[in-house]
Image (cartoon, rainbow, N blue to C red):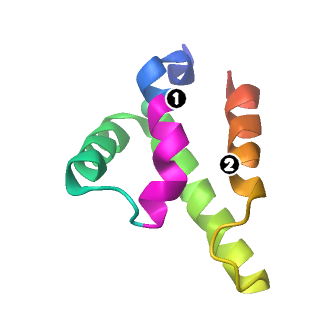
Amino acid sequence: MTNPHTDEHCLAIFERLSEYIDHELDTVTCEDIETHLNGCQCCHSCLETLKRTVALCREMKPDPVPETLSSRLKDLIRRLQ
Ligand SMILES: [Zn+2]
């Protein structure tokens, strides 16, 4: 099985997932991400993981998205590749 995260589109989706969760993106971008997530099992499971991480962070801190989230996300991408 080839890793779909070597795909450039997957990386672009990945970089926007935290914004997507926080509803910071416009409708067109959201639809683009949703279309990709529906066809990409790997990105879909990453979204679920990220959602849990964000929920966990929110429980611990009043700050909605910690600064470290994007760097943690990049670390995750690197490990998946
Ligand atoms: Zn993908």
Q: Tag 2's secondary structure? A: helix
| Quadrant of the drawing holding the N terminus | top right
Q: What secondary structure prevails in the magenta region?
A: helix
Q: Residue at x 72, y 65 (%)?
A: 66
Q: Is residue 37 left or right of residue 62?
A: left
Q: Which residues are magenta?
A: 12-22
Residue 36 in the image, given as x and y percentages of width and height: 32, 37
- Residue extending farthest to the top is 2
- Residue 75 in percent (x, y) is at 77, 37
Dividing the image into four quarters, tell me where ligand 1 lies: top left
Q: Position of residue 15 (x, y in %)?
A: 54, 40
Q: Residues within 10 Å of mark 2 (few under 14, many from 20)?
A: some
Q: Tell me the quarter of the picture where residue 56 sits.
A: bottom right
Q: Quadrant of residue 60?
A: bottom right
Residue at 45% x, 37% y: name it.
13
The residue tagged 1 is 11
Tell me the amino acid under the disc marked 1.
Leu
> Residue 67 versus residue 12: which sits nearer the camera?
67
The residue that appears at 35% across and 56% down in the rendered structure is 25
Residue 48 drawn in magenta: no
At label 2, the amino acid type is Ser
Q: Is the residue 45 above or below the residue 81 in the image?
A: below
> Which numbered dot is residue 70?
2
